[in-house]
């Protein structure tokens, strides 16, 4: 039994890395634009389909294909933000962005149904089905690669945020948009590029999701509810929090799954409730600034 | 008394400015000159339009009518970034530091629009000379500072661009009385160093005492303007806005 639990913990950590890849974009977008992008789940699935097309029709390796899908998803994100979200202002903005991003999700989902039909697909490659045996644990290559990629991408985003001028403008906009405008930051540009980056990351998450799960155009909805739970638990806007919460939630689910697969999903959301009761801002969330 | 009451040439001239939020106008035809090299203090009751005036000058709010002329350039309709480049820096009413960044990072960001790294470094050094006490907090997170300390860092950040005109919106707001002296001292210090200041101040007496010029706003219009002393000593204004005769 102990061996089973250890294996479940290792599995949970590795799968958590994959979810972190999907959640990071969502929390980054929330941090800067103060909106929940409901389309993020469907965009992950779109990323999976783009990888599918490159892999099946053009025989491009899943990881090599990211060189095409990441920029493509960046452009899609920029267009979404520029065309729809940028225009929303005023008191109803948050509610309206939920509706607009939900509408975007429906349009993307409908287009995917039109192009690929309702049948489930899964990405395939030699490393998707093989694993390595280390210290008695079976470690699937795809999860190892995915986890490594998650660490690299999250480190890259950290470097972008904390080591570049653009990153400083993103952090400033996140903390106080009006003050950022008053020191000369073009906050509209920051919002557009950040949305693009947040969506670009879903190309990687989508490829990993598609390689480890079967998917159809409808798969985005289950995904968005899980991703929302993760970013709330991690602390809205916190990238490190998204990684920590992904690993925590998926490890917990994986361990509970040994005894009861039915309860595993319930525990995923129950953990969210319990943590929020104790710490309402999540793992790394910051309490709202005191009114001056 | 309706004229600006100043011999100095104006650095900023506002003419028939109308601006507001949603369907209503808050500013209803404001006429105002800000004298170069002085401190002009705007006082008035809540809702008079003082902060709206600041937002319209700095580009946070787009005016509906009128002009805001700064050395021959009309600021009306320009973005905050463009207005900043013309030399107008706005320190808003609420604390505006980036709480999770250090004091040094905050001050550096004041020079965000300066492309040249050497210029930024030179300006940083100059700012720390003006406010040497800030050096002691340089590595602290801005959110950990007291209200008065945050105000001084906001001033320091504003000085990074060597502004032609500095807009200070209620800098004493929320500060303990013992801190006010430091904040007003810093305002005087910046002015003596050559910065023209347009000050909105709820602590009207203290603001007007500090200022070379005073302006009283009411219902989105300038009701009275003159020297700081004239406004301070005006019996009607004293009764209405300054808590009785001086």
Image: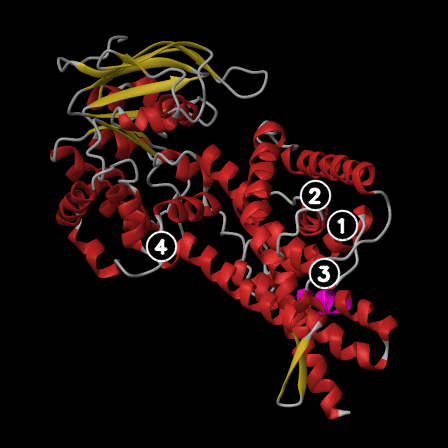
Question: What is the chain letter for disc 4?
Answer: A
- Front residue of A281/A165: it is A165
Q: Chain of mark 2?
A: A
Which residue in the protein does label 3 denote? Answer: A124
For the residues labelled 2 and 1, say whether their Cβ atoms are less than 8 Å apart: yes
- Spatial distance from mark 2 to mark 1, Cα to Cα? 8 Å
Q: Secondary structure at mark 4?
A: helix
Chain letter of the residue beneath label 3 in the structure image:
A
Decide if residue A240 is on the left or right side of residue B57.
right
Q: Which residue is mark 2?
A: A39
Task: Say which residue appears at 27% left-offset and 53% top-offset.
Answer: B104
Please identify the quadrant where the C terminus of chain B is shown: top left
> Is there CB contact under 8 Å for labels 2 and 3?
no
In the rendered image, residue A272 lying in the magenta stretch gets the answer yes
Q: Nearer the viewer, mark 3 or mark 4?
A: 3
Image coordinates of residue B152 in percent, x first then y, are 26, 47
Q: Are marks 4 and 2 on the same chain?
A: yes
- Of labels 4 and 2, earlier in sequence is 2
Front residue of A80 and A273: A80
Separation of disc 4 and disc 2 at Cα? 29 Å
Q: Position of residue A7 (x, y in %)?
A: 70, 83
- Rounded to the nearest angstrom, the CA distance separating label 3 from label 1 is 20 Å
Q: Which residues are magenta?
A: A270-276
Report whether mark 2 lies on the same chain as mark 3.
Answer: yes
């Amino acid at each position: 039994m102990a061996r089973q639990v250890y294996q479940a913990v290792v599995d949970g950590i590795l799968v958590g890395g994959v979810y972190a890849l999907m959640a990071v974009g969502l929390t980054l977008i929330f941090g800067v634009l103060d909106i929940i992008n409901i389309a993020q789940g469907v965009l992950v699935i779109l990323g999976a389909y783009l990888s599918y097309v490159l892999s099946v029709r053009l025989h491009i390796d899943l990881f090599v294909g990211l060189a095409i899908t990441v920029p493509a998803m960046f452009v899609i994100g920029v267009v979404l933000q520029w065309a729809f979200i940028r225009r929303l202002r005023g008191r109803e903005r948050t509610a309206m962005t939920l509706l607009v991003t939900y509408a975007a999700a429906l349009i993307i989902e409908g287009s995917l149904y039109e192009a690929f039909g309702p049948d489930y697909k899964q990405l395939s490659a030699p490393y998707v089905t093989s694993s390595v045996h280390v210290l008695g644990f079976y470690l699937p290559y795809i999860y190892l690669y995915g986890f490594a990629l998650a660490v690299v991408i999250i480190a890259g985003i950290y470097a972008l945020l904390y080591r570049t001028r653009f990153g400083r403008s993103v952090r400033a906009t996140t903390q106080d948009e009006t003050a950022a405008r008053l020191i000369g930051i073009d906050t509209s540009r920051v919002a557009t590029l950040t949305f693009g980056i947040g969506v670009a990351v879903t190309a990687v998450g989508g490829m990993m999701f598609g390689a480890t799960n079967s998917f159809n155009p409808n798969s985005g909805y289950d995904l968005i509810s899980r991703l929302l739970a993760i970013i709330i638990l991690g602390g809205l806007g916190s990238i490190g929090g998204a990684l920590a919460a992904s690993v925590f939630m998926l490890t917990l689910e994986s361990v509970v799954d040994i005894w009861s697969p039915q309860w595993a999903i319930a525990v995923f959301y129950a953990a969210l409730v319990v943590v929020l009761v104790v710490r309402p801002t999540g793992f790394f969330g910051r309490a709202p600034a005191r009114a001056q | 008394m309706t004229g600006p009451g100043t011999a100095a040439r104006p650095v900023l001239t506002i003419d028939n400015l109308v601006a507001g939020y949603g369907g209503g106008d808050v500013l209803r035809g404001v006429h105002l000159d800000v004298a170069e090299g002085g401190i002009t203090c705007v006082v008035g009751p809540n809702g008079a339009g003082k902060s709206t005036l600041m937002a319209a000058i700095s580009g946070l709010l787009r005016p509906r009518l009128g002009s805001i002329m700064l050395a021959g350039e009309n600021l009306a309709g320009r973005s905050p970034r463009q207005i900043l480049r013309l030399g107008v820096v706005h320190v808003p009413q609420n604390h505006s530091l980036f709480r999770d960044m250090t004091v040094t990072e905050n001050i550096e960001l004041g020079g965000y629009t300066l492309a040249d790294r050497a210029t930024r470094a030179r300006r940083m050094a100059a700012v720390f000379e003006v406010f040497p006490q800030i050096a002691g907090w340089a590595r602290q997170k801005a959110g950990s500072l007291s209200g008065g300390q945050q105000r001084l860092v906001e001033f320091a950040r504003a000085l990074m661009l060597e502004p032609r005109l500095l807009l200070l919106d209620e800098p004493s707001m929320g500060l303990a009385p013992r801190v006010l002296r430091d904040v007003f001292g810093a305002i005087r210090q910046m002015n003596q160093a050559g910065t023209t200041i347009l000050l909105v101040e709820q602590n009207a007496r203290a603001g007007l005492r500090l200022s070379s010029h005073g302006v009283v706003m009411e219902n989105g219009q300038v009701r009275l303007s003159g020297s700081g002393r004239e406004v301070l000593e005006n019996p009607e204004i004293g009764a209405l806005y300054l808590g009785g005769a001086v």
